[in-house]
Image (cartoon, helix red, strand yellow):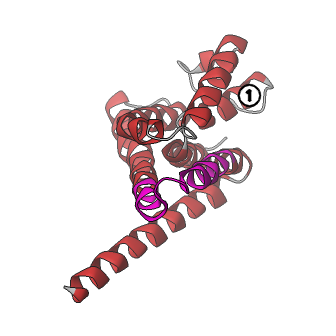
Amino acid sequence: MDTLEGISIGIALSAACGFRIFIPPLVMSIAAVFGHLPLASGFAWMGTYPALIAFAVATTVEVGAYYIPLVDHLLDTIATPTAIAIGTAITAAFLPDTDPLLKWTLAAIAGGGTAGTIQGLTGIARISSTALTIGLGNSVVATIESFGAFVLSILALVLPFLAVSLAVVLIVVSLSKIIQILYSKKQVE
């Protein structure tokens, strides 16, 4: 795997962490256990069966918890810093072994930033869903987020450049919609 491909995989998996924190590490672990994903030194533990089991349990609990009213909002409060941290670590796992300051700075900016941005946007979607549907639409949002995390995680490993492009388009379109909504509300006032 070349450097650009590794960075793309890391950023795309970090973006998927913005949807669900544990799905990308689960997909990474499955791929590593079956020999389809080489991991950087220090991250080989992710390719073990105990890690695979732990990520599977954590993913099941996380996905299920987002279907419980009020718990979904509580999870959003802790998910943002956690997504940033895990996004940073995932991106670092795919960066070449270079100067640690450069590696972790790039991982924090690219991986953590992407994960945090996507997580923030999903939080806005959940709050909007709650406001518009009295919380009844939150299960639909949760399903879309989980599906998005799985699809983006798999795409990150199979077609990393497409996955990064998809994440960038998602961020740009979402931010432009938010700006458009805010601008139209300001015009009404």
What count of labels does the image hold? 1
Which residue is denoted by mark 1 in the rendering?
Answer: 30
Q: Quadrant of the N terminus?
A: top right
At 53% from the left edge and 52% from the top edge, which residue is drawn? 138
- 96 is higher (above) or lower (below) than 40: below
Q: Quadrant of the C terminus?
A: bottom left
Dominant secondary structure of the residues highlighted in magenta in the image: helix
Q: Is residue 66 magenta?
A: no
User: Quick check: can you spot residue 138?
Assistant: yes
Q: Nearer the viewer, residue 132 or 118?
A: 132
Say which residue appears at 52% left-offset and 64% top-offset: 170
Reply yes or no: does residue 143 show up in magenta.
yes
Q: Identify which residue, 42 or 171, lies in the foreground.
A: 171
Residue 176 is left or right of residue 142, and the answer is: left
Q: Is residue 52 left or right of residue 125?
A: right
Q: Nearer the viewer, residue 84 or 165?
A: 84
* Image coordinates for residue 188, horizontal then vertical, percent: 24, 87
Kindly identify the residue that appears in the image at 57 percent across and 57 percent down. 164
The boundaries of the magenta stretch are 125-150
Task: Say left or right for 136 vs 130.
Answer: right
Q: Residue furthest top?
A: 50
Residue 123 versus residue 139: which sits nearer the camera? 139
Residue 125 % position (x, y): 45, 58
Relative to 53, is 71 above or below?
below
Asked if residue 185 lies left or right of residue 51, the reply is left
Question: Up-down: is 172 above or below 93?
Answer: below
Q: Position of residue 113 (x, y in %)?
A: 38, 48
Q: Position of residue 32 (x, y in %)?
A: 72, 26
SS at circle 1: helix
Question: Which residue: 31% across, 32% down?
Answer: 101
Indicate the amino acid at tag 1: Ile
